[in-house]
Image (cartoon, helix red, strand yellow):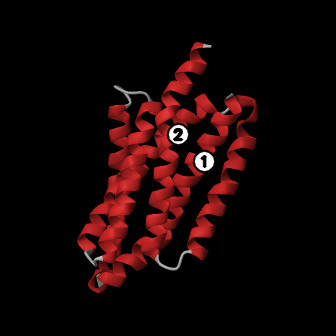
Amino acid sequence: RRGIEVILFGAIIAAFEGALFVFVFSWSPLLLGGWPGLGPHLGLVFSLFMLCCAGGSFCFKTLSEIWSPAKLLFPILAVAFSSLFAAAYAARVNCMPAVLVAFLLFELSVGMYFPCTSALKSDVVPDRKRALIYSLYRVPLNGFALGVLLGVPSQTSALALCGAVLCGVAVWAVLMPSKLAQRMAD
């Protein structure tokens, strides 16, 4: 039973962190493609991303006093996939300020994601196999990111695909709180 949890949790990690890699490679070319005058201000944009990431970490700290990390994972994934879909759509209609706002929301979800999954890994992944499993989690993550970056022709399509994959793994995040609670009770 625990083995399937470890595998499905790995799918969540691969999807989210793979989407993050795609975002890292896509954000500046996408913004500059529709907003050429932004070039000298990319440092400011990156600073805003880091501010949102820090804000997400603070949000997680505050919300985790009320809800468990397992219950917070789905809302975090929902913000992530919604923001990637929004960014892809806004880029297609060439509304770059909306793309930037969507990217800032994605970075907020990134700031919440890492402390959340760090807490969950200690519950899901067995201690004596932790190093091996964490290393194995990197294989599908890198495969997904490379597949999207090398195989998807446009950045907007890549972001939409990442959003769809995150939406798919979010289903497991809905089931995770009950699975963890059941295992803790056994």
Can the viewer see residue 53 in this picture? no
Choose top left, top right, bottom left or bottom right for residue 118: top right
Residue receiving disc 2: 172
> Is 66 placed above or below 27 here?
above
Q: Residue at x 31, y 62 (%)?
A: 102
Q: In this view, does 27 lie to the left or right of 126?
A: left
Residue sitting farthest toward the top: 185
Residue 119 place in picture, x, y as percent: 52, 33
The quarter of the rendered structure image containing the N terminus is: top right
Percent x, y for residue 88? Answer: 37, 69
For residue 40, side relative to residue 125 (left or right):
left
Which quadrant: the C terminus? top right
Label drawn at residue 115: none
Front-most of residues 44 and 150: 150
Q: Do the residues labelled 2 and 1 touch (CB within 8 Å)?
A: yes
Location of residue 112 in the rendering, given as x and y in whole percent from the top left corner = 41, 44
Q: Could you tell which of marks 2 and 1 lies nearer the N-terminus?
A: 1
Query: Nearer the viewer's eye, disc 2 or disc 1?
Result: 2
Residue beneath the point at 58% across and 17% down: 184
Report the residue marked by disc 1. 11
Residue at screen point 46% across, 36% down: 174
Which residue lies at the image location 45% right of the left edge and 39% below the top edge? 73
Which SS class for mark 2?
helix
What amino acid is at disc 2? Trp
Q: Nearer the viewer, residue 39 or 186?
A: 186
